[in-house]
Amino acid sequence: MDLKEGLRAETWAKSSLAENEMSKRISSNNPCFTDFNSQQYQQKWEDPSILDYDIRINPAFQEFNQPPQNQSSLPCDPTNQIKNPFQMNENLQTNKMQDWDPKAMLNNLSFLEQKIHELQDLVHLIVGRRSQILGRPDELVAQQQQLITADLTSIIVQLISTAGSLLPSMKHTLSAATPSMGQLGQFGGVPFPPGAGLSDSIQVQNSCAKKVSNQSNPIDLVGNSGTQQNHAVEEHDLKDEDDADDGEQLPPGSYEILQLEKEEILAPHTHFCTICGKGFKRDANLRMHMRGHGDEYKTPAALAKPHKESSSEPMLIKRYSCPYAGCKRNKDHKKFQPLKTILCVKNHYKRTHCDKSYVCSRCNTKKFSVIADLKTHEKHCGKDKWLCSCGTTFSRKDKLFGHIALFQGHTPAIPLDETIKGLAGPSDRREGNEATSKIGSTNFNFGSSVPNGTGVSDMDAKGES
Amino acid sequence: MKKQRCSEKINLFDLLSEEIVFIILDCLNTNPFDKKSFSLVCKSFYITESKHRKKLKPLRQEHLPAVLIRYSNTTHLDLSLCPRINDHSLFAISKITSFTLQSIDLSRSWGFSSSGLLSLTLSCKNLKEIDISNAVSLKDAGAAALAEAKNLEKLWMGRCKMVTDMGVGCIAVGCKNLKLISLKWCLGVGDLGVGLIAVKCKEIRSLDLSYLPITNKCLPSILKLQHLEDLILEGCFGIDDCSLAALKHRCKSLKVLDMSSCQNISHLGLSSLTSSIGGLQQLTLAHGSPVTLSIANGLKKLSMLQSIKLDGSVVTRAGLKAIGDWCVSLKELSLSKCDGVTDEGLSYVATKHRDLRKLDITCCRKISDVSITHVTSSCTGLTSLRMESCTLVPREAFVLIGQRCRFLEELDLTDNEIDDEGLKSISRCSKLSVLKLGICLNITDGGLAHVGMCCSKLKELDLYRCVGIMDSGILTIACGCPDLEMINIAYLKDITDSSLLSLSKCSRLNTFESRGCPLITSLGLAAIAVGCKQLIKLDIKWCHNINDVGMLPLAHFSQNLRQINLSYTSVTDVGLLSLASISCLQNMTILHVKGLSPNGLAAALLACGGITKVKLQAAFKQLLPQPLIDHLQARGCVFQWRNKAELDPKSWKLLLEDTVP
């Protein structure tokens, strides 16, 4: 358990491409379970802990593969090295450590990849055999499962032994996250050590997992994956900021514009069967479903998650258009700015063109149309103590001051409590009256958006000032 | 009224035009009581004087409304003598002077709140200057109230420690025309607040950010200010070399920069800073990093530099030489308490900067007559020379000062070897107005007589512990220096009442210290009281012969007295109670006064309406009723309880004689 904890923590400290890579690989590994008892399979996929567990391994490995002394002990495969340039770049970007040796990292990554490929081959083998011995007793199933588990364990052990020496240096990254146990429920049966810095990273982890599966839909539809994957990573880094202009200026025509319909966007499922129209939350589930439509969907190739290495045909960059006419994100708009991913489309559409149906249960004021936004807000709700005269609240003082510096006439609003208490002496019987008259005269806008209740709680939070 | 009408006499004074009376009033500035007397001459004078007065410095808040109604043209209101100003007073001020008031000083007052301030700023639309320094309990709400003074140009708010970025942010947004703001010791204000000031108040000329927890982040926006001339960054520990190196903006307008006690700035930061502020005229780097060759070279780019102050820093020989090699010609150089100032370095600097007007080499203990020779021979235009405690300088060197530096106006020779010959020579400096000779043990009446005869413009004379001085020396000073405003004859044990009688001719005397002069009696003090009506500060500690007889004339004549030290005198309840009638008395030190009873003290304190600070023996704390103490404190009086044993005034001298051979 200790080892697992360590790994998990490392992974959460960073969200990188590797997670996506890994999850893809997992879905490509997926078909090996095809012939298992289908219920069991379903369970596996529905249980996020398994997915997360696997995802966790890879980035952790990336980070731990640092000490140069490991270099000699690890087999170096030049072809594997070349195979993974993107992963390499990502590592360069994300790793903050100064004594980081990219070559050693590359070697280690290659080694890991090799191992995983071996395992993948093994699984393929099992799958191949499975089609013949369908419906066999459970012992065989268990046996094969054991085999795979053993291999996986060996990879993990390898990983940990490499990482062991680096553990102390990772503590800094660990402490960056703050705990919020509300998130933990999502992880089902996986026990979590209390007090460890988890929350933010967990959320990232989680949303990442979801996003990856979401994004695999367009990949399936168009049969390409490479660049799409890259952009998925970018999106992942940006998190919810689909509206943010990241300065990407693709010349018109250099990308293909897709426009989903409103119903499609708002549907809870994002993966739709092209034959019967049934929707799924996960692409992997859709692929499972497709088996029922004919044998051609049962081949390992059809069931495997499309991978960038497997796609040889030249592909066009995909961009998305909002179906809402007149929207800047709509392809007919003069200054059309395309959306990068399906998730962007969904979030954009909900935020911009839908009712804000999620109300914060704490302040009962803020409304959101994307549930993730509500959750983000709830984390900070009540902590927004920096108030502008225009009624806008900020969770950070520098943001407030940036806002004030930008707009004419806006001024920092001193919370009500302080206006009453802010006396320069013990005298003053008239303080109450004066305080209220002051508010009237200074035109501070304590509008409906900022009820007094919040103001008071702001002050409580402020305390020291 | 009836009488007047019946007499049908025409008052000649009524015929004088207002303009003429105004001109007369303009000349009555020396004694604040002159104008009062003038206004009592006749009704027309009374009315004219009321119209004439623009500046008010009231003593009590109680009479404020009446006073303000009488002086309806008041533009400047200085409340620094009112220890307590509550919101009612501020409401009254804002109501009565709403159109005229331009400046208000609340730096010494307390008891008001943000609401009082708000009424002031909302109704006095012409308010241009507010001094709210020392309002330690003022919070952001108060700062927000200040922000309503839309035409504010100058704002002093030093030591407003509770004000945060939010409050300063309000001021930055509200007071767009700010030209000066002092945020010294506003510990709650950081980068964000200061940065917003720099962004919103484009007219800023003077910015005092001393001891603020600011870092590099706000500096770029500050240096972008187009009109910034004075920038004080004393004790800003958060500013370091890295930030200064990154500065790219050139601040052409900056003339005065103070970066004293900025410990994290070395020559690297300075040289990058100086390259961006080429027009600097005055630079203060006191208590900073050692002044080495690299620092001095970094400052070479400042082609307009006129004044540099390096007080308290370590100065290397090479650094001093490099300063000498600058192409600019310095007017002012301060090396006070600089370690490492040697004859060689100082001589070199002096020969290179011949236009030097002010030189401060206080406590440069390594320099000798070599330095003085060079300084006096090349810097003949010196107006100020401060060289306290330059112990290696021999008595002969002081003759050179008098011979060569004829334009000296200020000379500090405290704790030096100067003798009568030196004094004789120095007396040639006919413009001398400040002369400090404290602890100069070699001078006698003979030398001082020369000063008295020749330096008629002397205003300030310090003879602290000049044990060789007696009555005749003081007599020549009193006769020859009619403009004398301040004299210190502390611990001159041979001084008698005759000195005081002669000094009583100096009608402008405002500070008189005769501590530890055992021969002085009440008679002498009475003469001073009668003659020196502008007396503000009086120290008669250890004058055992002064008793109530001296206090009575003091109470009667010295109506300007603000500060008095009565420790170890023979004053009793009666004397103290009579002193209480001095309306502007603020500060009293009453330790070891044997004739004082708790009741007498209580009565005197109660009667002293304007008292702000009393130093008393701790024993009185129990003897005075607590409600009385509470009441006085509520009135704005601060008690300082001392528990010192009785001392012999000679003990210090004995110590001195032991250490100085």
Image: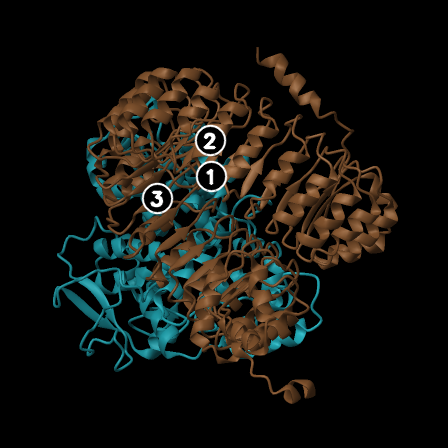
Chain colours: A cyan, B brown
**Disc 3: which residue:** B257
Of labels 1 and 2, earlier in sequence is: 2
Distance in Å between CA atoms under marks 1 and 2: 9 Å
**Disc 1: which residue:** B458
Q: Are marks 1 and 2 in contact (CB under 8 Å)?
A: yes
- Chain of the residue under label 1: B
Dots 2 and 3 on the same chain:
yes
Of labels 2 and 3, earlier in sequence is: 3
Q: In this rendered view, identify the residue nearer to me: A308 or B433.
A: B433
Q: Name which residue type carries label 1.
A: Leu
* Labels 1, 2: front one: 2
- Chain of the residue under label 3: B
Residue B545 falls left or right of residue A267: right
| Label 1 element class | loop
Q: Position of residue A17 (x, y in %)?
A: 32, 48
Distance in Å between CA atoms under marks 3 and 1: 33 Å
Of labels 3 and 1, earlier in sequence is: 3
**Disc 2: which residue:** B451
Q: Position of residue B576 (x, y in %)?
A: 78, 48
- Chain of the residue under label 2: B
Q: Position of residue A73 (x, y in %)?
A: 32, 22
Q: Are marks 2 and 3 in contact (CB under 8 Å)?
A: no
